[in-house]
Each structure stands twice: as structure tokens, then as C-alpha cells.
Image: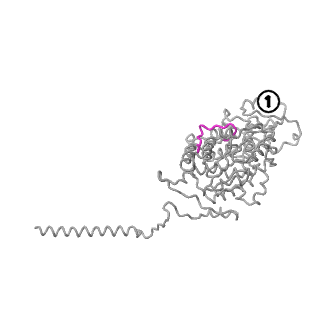
């Protein structure tokens, strides 16, 4: 009996041994031999990188690049261990639109313009984006006072001394036709009125319906032509009929297109930037006019600061002459310097291989002030480096036309970052929101300069600590909800949030 048990136990051991050998062989072949011969799995040296293949579209855009452009590697992609997502995905990801969509169509009781009572001439003032905002206001004013709008005259006497006419910067015919159901617009006054008497009026700033219906419209009893001496900030942002607000939106974001030649070169610049991958448009307001006007001198030499002071003193329409630059900067009233922008972008986590488009005029001090930023982010491009001299020749002596090119590339960028919250910054941010909540990061300049000063003093070092503090400061500045937007100097942010959009479910 005992012998039979031993024989059975030995047979069981052999069976178990054979089973273990079979399992081991199956495991071995499952690792080195594909189960389905048709399955092909590439061998990745880096488990977090995917194979790249140049698409037809990429090939086409790269062919557009002039010979002097060089190709750079795409930004490195690092795994965020806490979430399992790629860090670069976070840096480029647009904010949620919360079902907020453009809303510019007039209401059902909106009517075509009735017979005009007279002609409205407009002299715009300021730079490109200040003039854009003023033109949109004047379209609405013409509707309110029942005027025929004559194509506005662009500012030729401001700091930039730009001789451009309306048709040099904007698509004149498209503007007239796009607003034909809203306001009658003509290119010139009728000959019989060209030399006649006209009322020249400085429209009161931030005025509402009552002002225009009572005080301005009453002037038709004496004059056939009213000339608005200035166009900026002449119409209130709030407490206007919804159809008037929607008209401003249509004028700003649909009717006021750039001239075809500007649109064509603008698209070319966008395509060339896209050949480097996702890109940041950096509006760097480190320019002579901005620094002289604001009195900001950070990172400047004493000689440069003195030169800017003299420019400010000799510019009669800049009222404030004595400015404390330290106080200005501590309050966040100064544009970030190129060096400060470099520290900011690095702290946010953007790698040195990030392509950056420099949306700016001539940087004050040139390369000497750009060296630090360029050392951090060598793929620093501009319209002058992306396009040939011949391509820019017709625009180069016209500040408004060059600014229009920057505007196009900025609106189309993956991320827009302004170093100062001026007219360009607000106009682009508003337009990007209207087009679908594209990502904009508005630096908290007041808080940032305190951190940067600590770096200069040696009480803080660049690295994880600074990065965490900068990211936390800007966590809620990636997107500003439409409920709490306010703007005191630009129409685009305030009424694009209130009147140029609505929620999808309102229409469902």
C-alpha cells in the first residue's frame, strides 16, 4: 500500500514539473514572438516619445520658409508622475470655453438704416488698436445719430508719424459692404459738401445714448456735416441697447478686416511660425514710446533713462512729466523687461526649445537688452526674421501696417503673453476669446517684480521654489471668466465678455 502511494506521488511530481516547463515556454515565446504576425510594434528608445512623421501640411509650410530660417527641435515632453500627463500638454492646453460662443446677430426687430440726417467725419487717434476700437465706436455712434459714416481718417500726427490711409491698413470695400445693413458708409464726402461749413466736435468720453441722441443729434438742425475730432473711448461700455453692442462686435470682429496684402503676409508669418511647432506670441512692450511715456527705467543705463526722460518732456500731448520709476514698477505699472520675461517663462515651465514670436516694434537698446531672453529661448523670431526684406518692403515704413502683422500672428498663436496690459494686449485677448477662448497668460507684474527683486538680492534662487510661486500666482490668470471682466480703456475686453458672446443652451 505504501509502495503504491509513493508511485502516485512520483507521477504527480512529474506532471507538475511538465506543467511548469510548458508555462515557462509559453511566457518566453509571448515576449519575443508576436502572436499575430501582422502586428508590428515599433521599437522606441524613449517610452514617452512617439514616432514623428512629416505631414503634407508641414512640408508645405516649411517650403514657405526663406533660406535664412533654421529648423529647431520640438519642445521636449516630460512625464508628470503625479498625473500621468505630459507637462508640455498643460503648457499649451487652451482654457475651457464653458459653451460660450460668439453672439453678434441682430435681434428680430433690428431694422436697416433709415434715411440719413447728415454725414459723420471721424479723425481717429492713437496707435493701431486704439484706432480700431475708436472706429468700432464710431460705427455705433453713426447708427445712434442716424448719420452716413465717411471712411475714417487714420492718425498721422501721433508719436509714430504713420502716413497710412484707411485702405492701406483695412479692407475698405469689405468694411462698407459688411455693415450695409447697419450704417451707410461712403469713401468720401460729396463734392458739394467738401468745402462747406462743418461742426467740429470733441465727443465727450464714455458717453451713453442720451448724450448722442440729445446733444449730438440736435446738431443736424444746423449742420449737414459733423466732424469727430477724436475717436477713442467716446462711447460707454455699459447701459447701451443690446443691438448697439452687437453692432460694435460685428464691426470689430467681422467687418474690420485688414487689407488683403496685410492678411496675405500675416498668414505667411503664421505658417512659418507653425513650422517650428506650437508657439508663443510675446507682445514685448519694451519700446521707446512705451518706456518714455511710462517713465520706466528697469534694466536701463543712466544714459538711456535720461534719453527717455528728454523724449517725454518734449512730447506735448503726454501730460505727466515727472515720474518716479521705482514707484511705477512697484505698483505694476511698468512693462516687464526682456530679462524679466525670460525669468517668467522659465518659471512657468516652458522649455528653452519653445518657439516664440516677438510681437513688437523696435526693442529699445536692441540686442543688448535682448541677450538674456535670447539665451534662454533661442528660437526667438519676429516678422523681420521670418520674412525677407522684399516681403516686408511695402510695410516697413508704416507702424500701423507692421503692427497689423503682429496682431494677426498674435491672434493665431497657441499662447499669447503680453508684457504690459495696453491696447494691443487687450485687443488681442478679446479677439482670441471671441474666436474660442484661446490661451492667454496675463503676467501679474506687481507680484512678479517682487519675486524678481528677491532674485537680484540673492534671497531667492531660480528653480522649483520660484517656479511653484510663479505658477500659483498665475493659476487663475490663464483665463478670466466673462462674469468679472472690467476694462477702463478698451472696448474689446469689456463688451466682448458681456455682449459678443452667449451660452449655447440659450439657443437650445
Mark 1, residue position: 218
Residue at the location (72% across, 35% down)?
235
Q: Is residue 490 magenta?
A: yes
Q: Is residue 187 magenta?
A: no
Choose between 320 and 6: the one closer to the eye. 320
Residue 185, above or below 29: above
Quadrant in which the C terminus is drawn? top right
Q: Residue 176: tell me if it is visible.
A: no
In the orientation shown, which residue stands out farthest toward the left? 1
Colouring rule applied to residues: one colour
Residue 397, above or below 116: below
Percent position (x, y) of residue 394? 79, 56
Percent position (x, y) of residue 142? 76, 37
Q: Residues within 10 Å of mark 1 (few under 14, many from 20)?
A: few
Residue 262, above or below 430: below
Q: Which residues are magenta?
A: 477-492
Amino acid at each position: 500500500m505504501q509502495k503504491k502511494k509513493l508511485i502516485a506521488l512520483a507521477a504527480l511530481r512529474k506532471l507538475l514539473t511538465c506543467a511548469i516547463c510548458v508555462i515557462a515556454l509559453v511566457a518566453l515565446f509571448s515576449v519575443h514572438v508576436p502572436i499575430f504576425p501582422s502586428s508590428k510594434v515599433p521599437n522606441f528608445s524613449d517610452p514617452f516619445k512617439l514616432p514623428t512623421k512629416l505631414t503634407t501640411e508641414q512640408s508645405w509650410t516649411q517650403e514657405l520658409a526663406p533660406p535664412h530660417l533654421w529648423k529647431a527641435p520640438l519642445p521636449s515632453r516630460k512625464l508628470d508622475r503625479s498625473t500621468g500627463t505630459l507637462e508640455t500638454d498643460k503648457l499649451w492646453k487652451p482654457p475651457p470655453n464653458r459653451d460660450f460662443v460668439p453672439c453678434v446677430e441682430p435681434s428680430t426687430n433690428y431694422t436697416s438704416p433709415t434715411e440719413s440726417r447728415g454725414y459723420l467725419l471721424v479723425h481717429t487717434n492713437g496707435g493701431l488698436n486704439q484706432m480700431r476700437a475708436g472706429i468700432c465706436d464710431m460705427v455705433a455712434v453713426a447708427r445712434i445719430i442716424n448719420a452716413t459714416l465717411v471712411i475714417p481718417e487714420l492718425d498721422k500726427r501721433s508719436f509714430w508719424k504713420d502716413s497710412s490711409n484707411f485702405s492701406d491698413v483695412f479692407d475698405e470695400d469689405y468694411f462698407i459692404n459688411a455693415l450695409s445693413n447697419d450704417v451707410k458708409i461712403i469713401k468720401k464726402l460729396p463734392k458739394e459738401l467738401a468745402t462747406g461749413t462743418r461742426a467740429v466736435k470733441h465727443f465727450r468720453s464714455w458717453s451713453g445714448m442720451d448724450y448722442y441722441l440729445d446733444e449730438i443729434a440736435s446738431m443736424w438742425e444746423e449742420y449737414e456735416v459733423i466732424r469727430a475730432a477724436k475717436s477713442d473711448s467716446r462711447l460707454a461700455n455699459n447701459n447701451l441697447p443690446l443691438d448697439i453692442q452687437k453692432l460694435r462686435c460685428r464691426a470689430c470682429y467681422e467687418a474690420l478686416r485688414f487689407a488683403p496684402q496685410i492678411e496675405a503676409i500675416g498668414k505667411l508669418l503664421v505658417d512659418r511660425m507653425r513650422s517650428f511647432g506650437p508657439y508663443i506670441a510675446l507682445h514685448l512692450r519694451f519700446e521707446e514710446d512705451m518706456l518714455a511715456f511710462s517713465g520706466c527705467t528697469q534694466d536701463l543705463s543712466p544714459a538711456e533713462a535720461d534719453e527717455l526722460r528728454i523724449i517725454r518732456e518734449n512730447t506735448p500731448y503726454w501730460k505727466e512729466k515727472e515720474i518716479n520709476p521705482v514707484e511705477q514698477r512697484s505698483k505694476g505699472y511698468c512693462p516687464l523687461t526682456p530679462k524679466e520675461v525670460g525669468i517668467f517663462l522659465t518659471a512657468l515651465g516652458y522649455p528653452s526649445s519653445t518657439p516664440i514670436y516677438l510681437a513688437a516694434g523696435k526693442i529699445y537698446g536692441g540686442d543688448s537688452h535682448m541677450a538674456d531672453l535670447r539665451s534662454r529661448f533661442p528660437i526667438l523670431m519676429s516678422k523681420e526674421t521670418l520674412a525677407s526684406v522684399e516681403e516686408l518692403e511695402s510695410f516697413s515704413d508704416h507702424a500701423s501696417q507692421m503692427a497689423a502683422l503682429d496682431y494677426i500672428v498674435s491672434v493665431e498663436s497657441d499662447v499669447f503673453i503680453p508684457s504690459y496690459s495696453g491696447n494691443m494686449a487687450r485687443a488681442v485677448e478679446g479677439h482670441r476669446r471671441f474666436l474660442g477662448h484661446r490661451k492667454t497668460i496675463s503676467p501679474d507684474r506687481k507680484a512678479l517684480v517682487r519675486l524678481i527683486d528677491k532674485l537680484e538680492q540673492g534671497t531667492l534662487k531660480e528653480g522649483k521654489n520660484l517656479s511653484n510661486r510663479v505658477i500659483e500666482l498665475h493659476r487663475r490668470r490663464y483665463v478670466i471668466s466673462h462674469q468679472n471682466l472690467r476694462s477702463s480703456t478698451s472696448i474689446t475686453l469689456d463688451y466682448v465678455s458681456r455682449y459678443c458672446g452667449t451660452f449655447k443652451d440659450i439657443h437650445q
